Image (cartoon, rainbow, N blue to C red):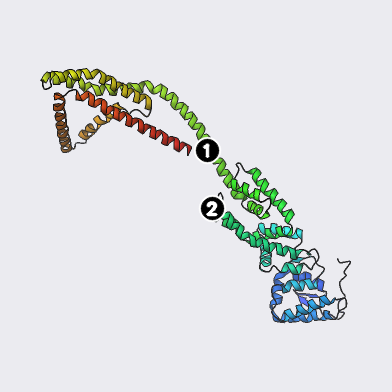
Amino acid sequence: SRTLFPPPEEPPDADPFDFLGERFTEPEHLARALDCHPAAATALLAQPEDRAALAAWLGRFETAGGRSPEELRRLAALRAELRGSPGPLTCVRLITWLGPYRDASLWGMPLTAEGIRALSVAARQGDAEALRLVDHLVRTPDILTVLSRRPRGEDLDEVRVRWLALRERWPHLVEELRRTPGISGLDRVRRRLRGTTAVWARLLELAREPDRTAARLTAEATAVRGRLPAAVPWFERLLLTGQDDPLRLLVAVLLAEDAVRGAAELHRRQVDEELQRLMDEDTDGVLAVMRRMDLPPTLAWALLGATVLMAPWCFVIGLADVLGRASQEAVVTAWAQTLPAAAAVFALELLTAAYIGPPAYHPRLSLAGLLIRSAERPARLTLSRRYVTVLLGAAVVAGAVLLGFTALAVAPWVWPLASVVALAAWSVRRCLVWRRRRRARAARRLG
């Protein structure tokens, strides 16, 4: 464009314009200085005296040859703006008029495709100058329209339209993702996806080069998925829906760290579950071996408990026969019940011990354990030296034994029958309790 459109001639009597200690006579040189020193340019336009001097200096170019009517019209509008209250676009319009053949740039940063790529990278890395420049564009997007008149900035006006549309969609997409099942932690989504300057820079890059940026985002997200030790459902959904919506690909890239963390947690949980399953299998095998090895001692405890339960029968029946308190018919009936009752007691206790098995049967659920615990309580009470309590307890027990002995002496057959019925009811209860505990352990293992 420089060879096809040579710069117009300058006024021969143009006085220099002072800026940053230098004297400028050529508009192109002043444009470059203003573009590369945005803070000084802003300070210049903030002073009424400096603006008036600049407007007067620009007035000399109205009579220079080679200026088109459109250029002269923009010059008149620019001078009027300098005499009034210049807005944010004034500096860009000034640089554009002074250096119309300079590549589209802002604050010395080119806004070509390559320049916007570099600007986006710098903003993501936290470069303060890049962040200020993007923030300036966010507040004044019409700058892109003005720069579209400069070389290599012809489509910046269309970029502005696409960029504003993407910025308009972004909050709605974030709100939608916050309500999507699987993306846990609303604070995390707000923190990573809120409309920061770095996000606006990436959206500007997407608006400047939609196809190229979408392809790069796809490659980045796919590379992240390839590193995940386990598939993360919400990340997979973003990649799938991102094929037709580059904004979702950008979300996937921004949430890459969360996907890696979630995949690591999911993988660790899967490994723990697999290890627990293997340990459970090993534990089940060990318990099966232990049950087989401990089954004889368990059955021995069952025999002991049954024997201790039946031992008083012969004493009570014989005593009732000797004392003559019971009729001969009652005594014969009691002796006749002894053998089947003994068989029932042995059968009930042995079946219960075999069903529950070691190590759960003894001592918590065995008849022998119950008898041992029952014998321990009076012994602990006696050793505690609480004599009044011991005497009262002994009196109550003696009265209960005397009453029971009197009843059994009259009807000794009640003892075997009551023992079998009580043991049968307790055996059913023990089996139900053990099965409930086993199901609870299995539920905890699966959960």
Q: Which mark is residue 397?
A: none
Mark 1 is surrounded, within 10 Å at the Cα level, by few (under 14), some (14 to 19) or many (20 or more) other residues, namely: few
The amino acid sitting under disc 2 is Gly
User: Is 272 situated above or below 237?
Assistant: above
Q: Which mark is residue 185?
A: 2
User: Is 147 situated above or below 11?
Assistant: above
Q: Is residue 364 visible?
A: no
Residue plotted at (51% across, 32% down): 278
314 or 339, nearer to the observer: 339
- Per the model, the C-alpha gap separating discs 2 and 1 is 23 Å
Among all residues in the image, which is located at the extreme front?
Answer: 329
Residue under label 1, please give it.
272
Which secondary structure, mark 2? loop
Residue plotted at (52% across, 34% down): 275
Residue plotted at (26% across, 19% down): 340
The amino acid sitting under disc 1 is Asp
